[in-house]
Amino acid sequence: MIKYFTIEDLLKHYLQKKFHILLIANPDLAIAAFQALKAEREKRQALEEAVAVQAQQIAELKPKATYYDVVLKCKDAVNISVIAKDYGWSAQRMNEYLHKKGVQYKQFDILFSQIGISTFTS
């Protein structure tokens, strides 16, 4: 069977052979090439690790961002300090009371409502 080669195949083969000959003939060039390859791989690995850390941070912060979006878009939300003022309490005292009664729970240092959208914390 006859195999046909393109000019690109021949050129690639020629350059690979030429590169191997250069590396064997010049060990310093080979060392420099492998050091550059090693540095590039280390840089790539560091970037991949940074991307993984950032992906984890995004996953952790996404629920918080969603919560803020819901609260900020809610036209009927009333600030807890306004409600607490009606009872003569501070917002902090009102939040503590609601938390003790099981109406709110803490997540990400934010009080969430068991029923629906929670009130703002002050």
Image: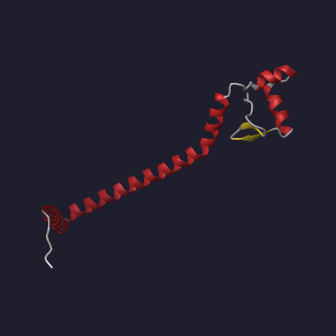
x, y percentage for residue 78?
74, 24
x, y percentage for residue 8?
15, 61
Residue at (16% x, 63% y) in the render: 15
* In-front residue for pair 12/115: 115
x, y percentage for residue 91?
79, 26
* In-front residue for pair 54/20: 54
Q: Quadrant of the N terminus?
A: bottom left
- Furthest toward the bottom, the residue is 1
Horizontal side of 53 relative to 103 (left or right) equals: left
Residue at (53% x, 48% y) in the render: 55
Residue at (64% x, 28% y) in the render: 73
Q: Quadrant of the C terminus?
A: top right
Residue 113's place in the image compared with 6, above or below, is above
Residue 80's place in the image compared with 37, above or below, is above
* In-front residue for pair 51/33: 51
x, y percentage for residue 104?
79, 38
Horizontal side of 75 relative to 36 (left or right) equals: right
Horizontal side of 38 relative to 75 (left or right) equals: left
